[in-house]
Image: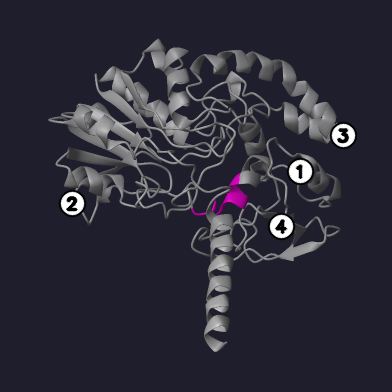
């Protein structure tokens, strides 16, 4: 009897652990037969044989057994000249916007060159002697998440310096749909380089094909582009992440809410940086009619968070049960409606909100009192136009 009780207790603990773990990292478990680009070395290792390579990756560049791609390539005698680090760094522990320094990977002794800050595009001397640059990063499929910009600059530099670009593809947690305002060329920046919607419904490998095919690189150059496709990937299914893509997207809930909540980064409202629930809560000291309270404080993912030390009032969305397959503007509109601060406008003075939105139209619609339905209907013509472009580059079926 006592033994049976212990076994039942152990099983219950395991089930609870598995439930928490899966909720923290992924929407569903891996599908039978599914493999990322990195998990198909039989395809890419022969292409790298006797080549000198660079690699753009971070903490998400893992094989299924959690071996890092860099370590795997070194073990298989692939000559890596340089590791290029994107925003958040090679190990993925830098804050958003924080300067990423050059250095050396302690484990392998390979030099690390930052592709963030003043050196977003590899210089000719940094590519000298390199035949192929391998790109392997877990993206989140949102326009203002900067890894697609890093890929764009890499492809441009590769085209200009006769260096091949090889992308090892990974899932997009916002695949299978498109939504949001389409960027207008005037608002081009590192958080939005192309005339695409906020959610563009392509894997990062498909996105690179689109950039190349539409000749969106500077001077219409085209890179020598090799895509290592995933196996048995389906756009509307959701797949496990082996590691968080950046410090403030710690779980699938934050990733699912990210396209809707990131607009707050251009306002006087916090999205929970400096709390245990980044991109799962929002609030400010000037929305006191909203029910949830929190106070941002420095932590691992935010050394000096926005509204540091100030009591904020807002909403807790960490238990929001819906798996969003569209942008939800109700939280943004509610915060704007409840915002009361005569000393500061709801939107930051630098109008970073417009940069995130891709134009000034969304801000003007919010100020003008337009409803969510009216705002979303205004996106449709541009979304329909983009969909015609997108369809040309889809590799995987829904």
What colour scheme was applied to this rendering of the protein?
Answer: one colour
| Distance CA(mark 4)–CA(mark 1) | 18 Å
Which residue is more in the foreground, 38 or 56?
38
Residue 130: quadrant of the picture: top left
State the extent of the magenta-drawn residues as a range: 247-255
Q: Name the residue tied to disc 2.
A: 109
Position of the C terminus, as image quadrant, is top right
| Distance CA(mark 3)–CA(mark 4) | 28 Å
| Distance CA(mark 2)–CA(mark 3) | 56 Å
Label 4 packing within 10 angstroms: few (<14), some (14-19), many (20+): few
Residue 325: quadrant of the picture: top right
Q: Position of residue 212 (x, y in %)?
A: 42, 17
Q: Residue 16, can we see it?
A: yes
Q: Name the residue tied to disc 1.
A: 332
Q: Name the residue tied to disc 4.
A: 319
Left or right of 327: which side holds 113? left
Would residue 251 be counted in the magenta stretch? yes
Label 1 packing within 10 angstroms: few (<14), some (14-19), many (20+): some
Label 2 packing within 10 angstroms: few (<14), some (14-19), many (20+): few
Q: Judge depth for marks 3 and 4 and give the one in front.
A: 4
Q: Position of residue 27 (x, y in %)?
A: 58, 48
Which residue is more in the foreground, 17 or 205?
17
| Distance CA(mark 1)–CA(mark 2) | 46 Å
| Distance CA(mark 3)–CA(mark 1) | 12 Å
| Badge 3 or badge 4: first in the primary sequence | 4
| Marker disc for residue 369 | 3
């Amino acid at each position: 009897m006592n033994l049976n009780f212990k076994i039942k207790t152990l099983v219950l603990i395991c089930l609870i652990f598995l439930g928490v773990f899966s909720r923290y990292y992924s929407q569903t478990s891996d599908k039978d037969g599914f493999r990322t680009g990195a998990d198909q070395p039989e395809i890419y290792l022969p292409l790298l044989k006797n080549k000198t390579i660079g690699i753009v990756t971070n903490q998400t560049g893992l094989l299924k057994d959690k071996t890092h791609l860099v370590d795997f390539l070194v073990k298989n005698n692939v000559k890596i000249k340089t590791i290029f680090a994107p925003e958040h760094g090679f190990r993925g522990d830098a804050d958003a916007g924080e300067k990423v320094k050059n250095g050396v990977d302690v484990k392998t002794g390979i030099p690390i060159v930052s592709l963030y800050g003043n050196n977003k595009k590899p210089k000719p001397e940094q590519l000298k002697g390199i035949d192929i640059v391998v790109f392997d990063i877990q993206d989140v499929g949102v326009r203002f998440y900067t890894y697609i910009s890093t890929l764009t600059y890499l492809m441009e530099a590769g085209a200009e310096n006769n260096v091949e670009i090889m992308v090892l593809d990974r899932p997009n947690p916002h695949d299978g749909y498109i939504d949001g305002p389409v960027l207008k060329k005037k608002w081009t920046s590192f958080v939005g380089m192309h005339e695409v919607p906020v959610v563009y419904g392509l894997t990062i490998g498909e996105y690179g094909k689109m950039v190349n095919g539409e000749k969106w690189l500077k001077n219409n150059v085209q890179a020598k582009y090799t895509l290592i496709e995933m196996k048995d990937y389906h756009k509307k299914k959701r797949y496990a992440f082996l590691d968080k893509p950046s410090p403030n997207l710690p779980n699938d809930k934050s990733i699912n809410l990210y396209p809707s909540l990131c607009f707050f980064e251009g306002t006087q409202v916090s999205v929970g940086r400096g709390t245990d629930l980044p991109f799962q809560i929002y609030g400010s000291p000037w929305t006191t009619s909203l029910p949830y309270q929190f106070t941002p404080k420095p932590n691992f993912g935010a050394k000096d968070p926005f509204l540091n030390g100030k009591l904020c009032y807002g909403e807790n969305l960490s238990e929001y049960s819906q798996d969003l397959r569209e942008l939800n503007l109700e939280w943004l509109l509610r915060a704007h409606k409840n915002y009361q601060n005569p000393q500061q406008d709801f939107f930051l003075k630098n109008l970073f909100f417009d940069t995130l939105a891709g134009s000034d139209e969304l801000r003007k619609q919010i100020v003008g009192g337009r409803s969510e339905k009216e705002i979303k209907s205004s996106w449709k013509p541009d979304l329909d136009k983009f969909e015609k472009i997108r369809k040309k580059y889809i590799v995987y079926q829904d």
